Image (cartoon, helix red, strand yellow):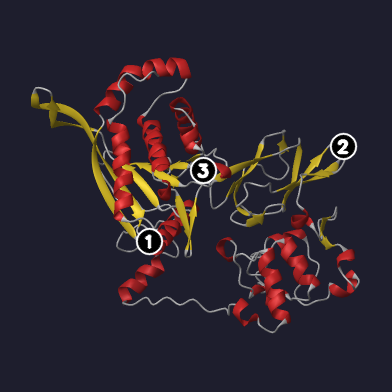
Amino acid sequence: MAKYNLLLPRMGESVSEATIVKWTKEVGDSIEIDETILEIATDKVDSDIPSPVAGKLVEQLFQNDEIAQVGDVIAILEVEGEIGSAPATEESTQGIEYEADNQYSIKEELFDTPISETASIPGLEMVSEDQVISNDQSSEDEPVKNERFFSPLVKSIALEEGISIDELQNVKGSGLEGRVTKQDIIKYISERSKGETKAQVEPKEEKKVDAGTPALSHALESTKSGTFTDSGDEIIEMDRMRRLISDHMLNSVKTSAHVSSFVEADVTNVVNWRNKNKDVFLKREGTKITFTPIFIEAIAKAIRDFPMINISVNGTQIIKKKNINIGMAAALPNGNLIVPVIKNADQLNLAGISKSVNDLAQRARANKLKPDEVQDGTFTLTNIGSFGNIMGTPIINQPQVAILAVGSIIKKPAVIETEYGDMIGIRHKMYLSLSYDHRVVDGALGGMFLRRIADYLEEWDINRIV
């Protein structure tokens, strides 16, 4: 039997690491080709990792909630045939070998001195795989030396440069949750050689909680062993996705100068056209036609008319986007939110937009989106009307500069201008609200853009061919 190194695969250009969420296979389990082994989460989306080979899982090299870099070995499988591994970049595997005795070893050709000499650096002795991976685990009789998780690559670079594990603990990380990346350790080494490492280390500080009143202090104590305070309040810890959403929204409020504009649109023609054609559309295209694709088509047309809405900001630079990629906010069954993106929406016809919308929405709810499918959006649509809301002021989805909220479509009495004079009739009306970044989008541009979307909806051709 041979050993197969399962690596964390590439998941998009801007994704370099992922958090291990859950192992769906345990050590000793048999695995078929393309069968899911574990679930991971990036800052973009959650994904399943399937096995490219059939075999048996013999080792899990990362525990739940630990972070792996793209290219890291995350599991060892026992397979028939020759020893193999999933494709890896040179950057992710250089200097690391996984050997049959379950120890990480450093390739000697990377060092000027023999392994036996370099391995004696305090705190970086050769240790077994479970010690390397589970830095937070130790016996009760021994002090915990490794308080943070470091990838094998970072450890090998530290060993090569003579950096002890205690010194490594103080290196400031730029990765997710403060993890030290390859770039961080290289930068630290460069600054260290110049004697400028003070800016790169963070002294450990004991966290203190000011409990305030005795009652609050007692309430805090009660939360340590349970999920309720003495007064009966339930303590619910945010899950990972909710924490990411929270950080993203706070960052947006701190970054952009939010302004909102509103219009009311008469969408009677849209409603009547959809009611007349939805069965024909379903039969011909094999997918339902909802209002969302119609809104997206109108947005894409308006963006082509006002391209300075399709921008992002980098300091004092305005980046005008070539592609029109429209994200649509989708509520998940667990109450969280995700924004899959319809790429090049202006180049799709209504059927193409409908198929993309329905496919992305279904896979979002089933947690089957790929990281690339929630990236590179240039404008976002959120349909608050699906929850019975008539209008809202959404927060901009950074680094975009505008987001549109569409409210409920409601029947209202309205004045209708005819050749015989004004009349009162029943019309389908809805509010559109646009939040935009006043740093780069003024009221004139924001207002005209919003009005243009409403115009496209109001001027919908009731005789349009499906």
Image quadrant where residue 414 sits:
top left
Front-most of residues 357 and 401: 401
- 1 or 2: tag closer to the N-terminus: 2
Rate crowding at label 2 as few (under 14), some (14 to 19) or many (20 or more) other CA atoms within 10 Å. Answer: few
**Percent position of residue 211, x then y:** 37, 75
Q: Is 91 placed above or below 188 here?
A: above
Q: Amino acid at mark 3?
A: Asn
Instruction: Give the SS element for disc 3.
Output: loop
Quarter placement of the C terminus: top left
Residue name at image x 66 percent, y 82 percent: 196
Can residue 59 be seen at all in this image of the molecule? no
Q: Which mark is residue 323?
A: 3
Residue name at image x 32 percent, y 36 percent: 386
Front-most of residues 271 and 453: 453
Rate crowding at label 1 as few (under 14), some (14 to 19) or many (20 or more) other CA atoms within 10 Å. Answer: some
- 2 or 3: tag closer to the N-terminus: 2
**Percent position of residue 432, x then y:** 28, 42
In-image side of 453 versus 281 (left or right): left
Q: Are marks 3 and 1 in contact (CB under 8 Å)?
A: no
Quarter placement of the N terminus: top right
Q: For the residues marked 2 and 3, what is the alpha-carbon distance in whole angstroms?
A: 47 Å
**Percent position of residue 429, x then y:** 22, 34
Q: Amino acid at mark 1?
A: Arg
Q: Which mark is residue 439?
A: 1
Can residue 258 be seen at all in this image of the molecule? yes
Q: For the residues marked 3 and 1, what is the alpha-carbon distance in whole angstroms?
A: 22 Å
Image quadrant where residue 173 sits:
bottom right
Q: Residue furthest right?
A: 114
Q: Is 248 placed above or below 58 here?
A: below
Residue under label 2: 81
Q: Are marks 2 and 3 in contact (CB under 8 Å)?
A: no
Rate crowding at label 3 as few (under 14), some (14 to 19) or many (20 or more) other CA atoms within 10 Å. Answer: some
